[in-house]
Amino acid sequence: MKLQVTQKLGHKVAGHTTRPETREAVWAFMKSYMQTSQGRPPTTREIRAGAGLRSLSTVHLALADLEYDGLIRRGEFGTTRGIRIVGATYRLPEEAGEKSGGNE
């Protein structure tokens, strides 16, 4: 069996490397987390805990699989919270003290 390796955003991706249920758990947690946190992505440690995984390497492999599938994009290595869901729109939260009427 021959794997095709491609280069995407600095990450080497070689097809699917995790079980489908692991990918689904990570994907479901990420969508839920980002909806409740106004688009702020989770850290890999938060994904590990939220998806019920034991290893950070499993999280990284699942993220690589999701990126390979075109569902997410990741920033450069070492970037905290550098995950983006492809096609999602992000809004800034409303400022509590913001006034709409100009200067007073």
Image (spheres, rainbow, N blue to C red):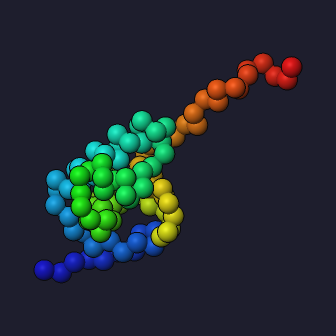
- Residue 14 vs 94, above or below: the answer is below
Image quarter for residue 60? bottom left
- Residue 81 vs 92, above or below: the answer is below
Image quarter for residue 53? bottom left
- Residue 32 vs 102, above or below: the answer is below
Quadrant (top left, top right, bottom left, bottom right) of the C terminus: top right
Spot occupied by residue 58 in the image (x, y as percentages of width and height)? 26, 65
The residue lying furthest to the left in this view is: 1
Identified at 48% across, 42% down, the residue is 39
Identified at 21% across, 68% down, the residue is 17
Identified at 42% across, 51% down, the residue is 42
How many numbered marks have been drawn onto this rendered protein structure?
0
- Residue 59 vs 39, above or below: the answer is below
Identified at 73% across, 22% down, the residue is 99
Spot occupied by residue 13 in the image (x, y as percentages of width and height)? 32, 71
Spot occupied by residue 35 in the image (x, y as percentages of width and height)? 41, 37
Horizontal placement of 102 versus 11: left or right? right
